[in-house]
Amino acid sequence: MEKIKLEVIDWEHTCDDGCCYSWGTDVKINGEKVVVKGDDNYIGDILASVLEHLGYEVDLTGTYS
């Protein structure tokens, strides 16, 4: 089985004046950034995007809050 390098990087950003705040998670496979479809803070979207990047067809179901 082929070994892959998986990087998961949490990030956050606050505007200079402090009026806005955002956060998310970047995912890289073998150094290549995976484009996360949907809400990049939702684990289901992250997992589906990783699997699609690896060539799988994904039917994502479920809920989160």
Image: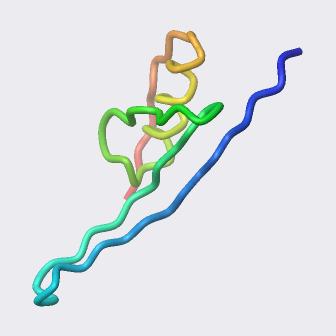
**Residue visible at 52% across and 43% down?**
27
**Residue visible at 23% across and 76% down?**
21
Residue 32, percent across and down? 53, 32
Q: Residue furthest bottom?
A: 17
The structure's colour scheme is rainbow
Residue 56, percent across and down? 57, 11
- Note whether 46 is above or below 48 in the view shown: below
**Residue visible at 89% across and 15% down?**
1
Determine whether, in the image, residue 10 is placed left or right of residue 5.
left
Q: Residue furthest front?
A: 31
Residue 61, by quadrant, is top left
- Note whether 7 is above or below 21 in the view shown: above
Determine whether, in the image, residue 40 is placed left or right of residue 30.
left
Residue 5, percent across and down? 73, 36
Q: Residue furthest right?
A: 1
Determine whether, in the image, residue 14 is placed left or right of residue 53.
left
- Note whether 30 is above or below 10 in the view shown: above
Point out the image quarter for the C terminus: bottom left
**Residue visible at 54% across and 57% down?**
9
Count of numbered tags: 0
Nearest the camera: 48 or 9?
Answer: 9
Residue 24, by quadrant, is bottom left
Residue 42, percent across and down? 42, 50
